[in-house]
Amino acid sequence: MKKYNVAILGATGAVGQEFLNLIEERKFPFANLKMLASKRSAGKVINFMGKDYTVEETTADSFKDVDIALFAGGSASKEFAPAAVKAGAVVIDNSSTFRMDPEVPLVVPEVNPEAIKRHKGIIANPNCSTIIMVMALKPLYDISRIKRVVVSTYQAVSGGGKEAMAELEEQVADIVAGREVKANILPGAALAKHYQIAFNLIPQIDIFKENLYTKEEMKMIDETKKIMEDDTLRITATTIRVPVYRSHAESVNVEFEDDISVEQARAAIDAFPGAKVRDNPDEMEYPMPLFTSGQNDVEVGRIRKDYSIEHGLNFWVCGDQIRKGAALNALQIAEYMIEHEML
């Protein structure tokens, strides 16, 4: 099997580390591996599969002889993705920089793999909460066209980075010890105010837009329409940060053109690659972050009729946003391109 030169931009972060876990786990065919990060992280040594790799500062010249550049996300994408493409690499980008660019495919491989072939050097990874939702929507959409979606998310602190995870841990320890609780990260480190996340919920992820939706909520709305290639979809979203380390959960209400039974929905989702039904009310079995953290599959449960509308279903979906919501989805795009000789 042919092997490929791979660069990981953001190798020291949570998504970068998950790239490494998955490359080893999935036996991804790499020949050479280049670890890239900011100047602050340059010089760190990462031991991967028995070999030490020194993290390099990312520059425009970092992508010579690179076949696949996995960008973990962040502001670096805007600066370095064009340089990587110019050097001959295919960029699979986890930031929001290119997602709504009409020239850039926005891809979930199980949902719209055909979009990959339209790439011009950059392929965008959708927002984590969008990926988790469309993995459950697509098998249902294939039965009956979707008219409207109402989604509320319950997003883990790891979506805010390592610092947010550490702050949750520190706050819980401070509360238990009776110490003063300090908040410096959430809802966003760069924002003017910060709130305790331990034993709390924060109904803000990212900044507010003029329409009073947050940027995260608008990502879900706009990206879902692009992935599903249906601008007529009506979607409304509320995104909430919860005191869970890892794995996002979402409550989804869907209105269809035609009737879909609970049994049809369960069968379609369970047969869909990367999705799994965990739905047994009699045994109190349903998806939870406890089960999906560290797992590749998105789990769906609490599937039930919405009796307030003619053709409606409610369901609850859980997925590891660092795996399927980020690193795994990007790596699957690369694997698809290799399998279909697109590299």
Image (spheres, rainbow, N blue to C red):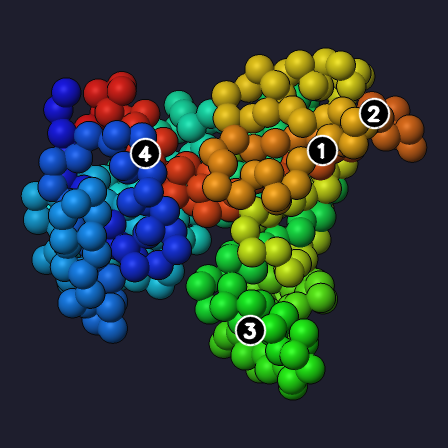
In the rendering, which numbered label is found on residue 282?
A: 2
Which mark, by number, is residue 170?
3
Which of 47 and 125 lies nearest the eye of the viewer? 47
Residue at image x 40%, y 38%? 328
Residue 237 picture location, percent across and down: 69, 49
**Residue 175: quarter of image:** bottom right
Which secondary structure, mark 4?
helix
Residue at the (27%, 55%) spot, across then down: 11
Looking at the rendered structure, the secondary structure element under dot 3 is: helix
Q: In this view, does 236 lie above or below 181?
A: above
Establish if 96 lies above or below 163: above
Chain-order first, disc 4 or disc 2: 4
Image quarter (top left, top right, bottom left or bottom right) of the N terminus: top left
Q: In this view, does 254 lie above or below 199?
A: above
Say which residue appears at 72% left-offset and 26% top-offset. Answer: 279
Q: Which quadrant of the view contains residue 249? A: top right
The circle drawn on residue 286 is 1
Q: Position of residue 223 (x, y in %)?
A: 53, 43
Tell whether label 3 touches label 2 (CB within 8 Å): no
